[in-house]
Image (tube, rainbow, N blue to C red):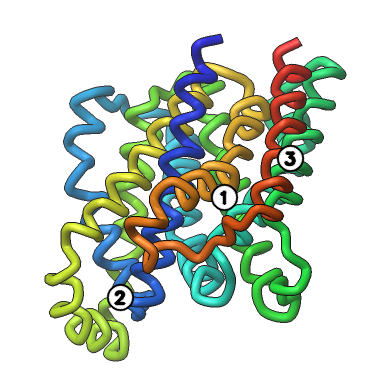
Amino acid sequence: MWWILVALFSPLLYGAANIVDEFVANRRLKSLSAFLFYSSTFNLLVLPFVLLWSPPVLPSPFLCGIIVLLGLLNFLYVYPYYRSLQEVDTSVVASLFSLSNIFIPIFSYLLVAERLGAWQYAGFVVIILASTLLTFNLKKFRVDGVLPLMLFSSAMVTAESIGFKYLFEHGVSWGTAFGGQLFFSFLFVLPLLFFPVVRHGIRASWGMFHRSVPLFALEELLTFGGAVASTYAMSLAPLTLEKTVEAFQPFFVLILALVFSRWFPRLFKEHTDRKNLMKKMFFFIIMGFGIWLMAS
């Protein structure tokens, strides 16, 4: 089950990317349309490396349509995600992403005929709930604003995962699916340039973007690495199991905050006092139990 090691890189890298995302969205590049344009451009730069690693093969027209849809989903989820990061703590956003995964087994069963054992489903539920409760703070949870945004964003990410798994189940290579998504996602961003307010936001943000290129490149590299690990693990293992491992993302966000916040205090918005650490350790033990159930 070495695929678990591959899959664990996804929540680790995505968690680190969440932290950088929050910092960039709140303190550097506040124009979300500009952020979307620059991030899509960065993604296009890494496309040749994806295609060299896994050369693409032209699939059937129907499967090509799914790849186009994946590009659209990758475009749609970004705005509500970054808007949520501007409203609440990074770990709360990560928790809401984890909670949305509870629907993965249902859709996997209906759309890609994926079936797991009873103990594996039990482990999935344990890990998803524990990862959500790990960082859930009712006092900071604003249902009126963040919940609908994250429900929409999470739905897009869930549909994206199902689309990737469907492609892999029908013989589409990893490079064809992932590289195609990057390409079409960039194409969906280009029409935004027809709107004067978007063009103005991109021009006005250029100075800040230019000064923040290393940080921005780090964020994109982390996001790209997380996506590579996630989609590659999907091609090796059942989708439900891969998404279960991704549920560790809030935990990695908190661990990174605990380790690095003393050196980079402005980069983190997490609570690491004794009371919170005890709570996190408790839920980490529960998540470990869920992994044991999933592997049984």
Q: Residue 24, percent across and down?
A: 34, 68
- Checking the image for residue 157, the label placed there is 1
Q: CA distance from mark 3 to mark 1?
A: 25 Å
Q: Dot 1, how many residues are within 10 Å of its Cα: few (below 14), some (14-19), or many (20+)?
A: many
Sequence-first disc among 1 and 2: 2
Front: mark 3 or 2: 3
Residue at left 50%, top 65%?
269
Query: Disc 3 marks which residue?
Result: 283
Amino acid at circle 1: Val
Q: Is residue 270 above or below residue 184?
A: below
3 and 2 marks in contact (CB < 8 Å)? no
As drawn, is 85 to the left or to the right of 95? left
**Please, what is the three-letter code of the amino acid marked with disc 3?**
Phe
Q: Which of the pair 169/270 is nearer the observer?
A: 270
Q: Nearer the viewer, mark 3 or mark 1?
A: 3
Q: Residues within 10 Å of mark 2 (few under 14, many from 20)?
A: many
- From the top left corner, tell me how far across and down residue 127 is, in percent: 73, 35
Instruction: Name the residue located 67 percent from the left edge and 56 percent from the top edge.
Output: 96
Residue at the spot of label 2: 29
As shown in the figure, which amino acid type bears the numbered disc 2? Answer: Leu
Q: Residue at x 13, y 79 (%)?
A: 207
Q: CA distance from mark 3 to mark 2?
A: 34 Å
